Amino acid sequence: MSVYARIAGWLAIQHAPALPSTRISPQNTSNPFVPVFKYTACEPCPTGSTCQGGANALSQQCPAGTHTELLGATTCNACPNGTASLAGATTCQECAPGTEPTADRSTCQLCPAGTYNKIPGEPCIK
């Protein structure tokens, strides 16, 4: 069994000892059902996510409209104008001609009726 904890941009992997080894319970008695955890490795938080909040924090995917391509990131970057991304993105994708990003930059949408654009990433115009 592995348990993951986030520490300032790093993932600490804890492994429970294999059964049936003896574990010490909170009452200091032998109890095979209370695991003792040992830190055995650290890994950077994965791309497309951030790690904040110390040892008990879990990684959080970057929200839609943001991204990070860095391992161990503590913040996500907003997608630039003319681009969009889904949650957990490592990069933002340029919107194709005839589309523009939604207000939250989570996806590209068709240009509204009566507008257009011919250049990828550009806003729709009349």
Image (cartoon, helix red, strand yellow):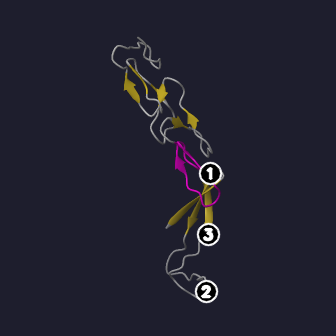
Return the residue at label 1.
52
Q: Residue 38 carries which label?
A: 3
Three-letter code for the amino acid on which mark 2 is drawn: Gln
In the image, taking residue 55 as reference, residue 116 lies left or right, namely left
Name the residue at 50% across, 81% down. 33
Disc 2/disc 3 C-alpha distance (Å): 19 Å
Residue 1: percent from left, percent from top: 49, 67
Number of the label disc, if any, that sits on residue 111:
none
Q: Distance between the residues labelled 1 and 2?
A: 33 Å
Residue neighbourhood size for the residue with mark 2, other residues' Cα within 10 Å, grouped as few (<14), some (14–19), many (≥20):
few
What SS does tag 1 mark?
A: loop
Q: Which of marks 1 and 3 is nearer the N terminus?
A: 3
Image marks 1 and 2: residues in contact by CB distance under 8 Å: no
Q: Nearer the viewer, residue 122 or 17?
A: 122
Examine the image and state in which quarter residue 23 appears: bottom right
Q: Give the range drawn in magenta.
A: 45-62
SS at badge 2: loop
Residue type at numbered disc 3:
Lys
Disc 1 to disc 3, C-alpha distance: 21 Å
Q: Nearer the viewer, mark 1 or mark 3?
A: 1
Residue 37 in percent (x, y) is at: 59, 71
Disc 1 residue crowd, few under 14, some 14–19, many 20+, Cα 10 Å: many
Out of 28 and 65, give the one closest to the viewer: 65
Q: For the stretch drawn in magenta, what is the main secondary structure?
A: loop
Q: Do labels 2 and 3 touch, CB within 8 Å?
A: no
Q: Which residue occupies 54% across, 79% down? A: 34
Instruction: Please tell me whether mark 3 sits on a helix, a strand or a loop.
Output: strand
Dot 1 amino acid type: Gln
How packed mark 3 is, by other alpha carbons closer than 10 Å (few <14, some 14-19, many 20 or more), is few
Residue tagged 2: 27
Q: Is residue 73 covered in magenta? A: no
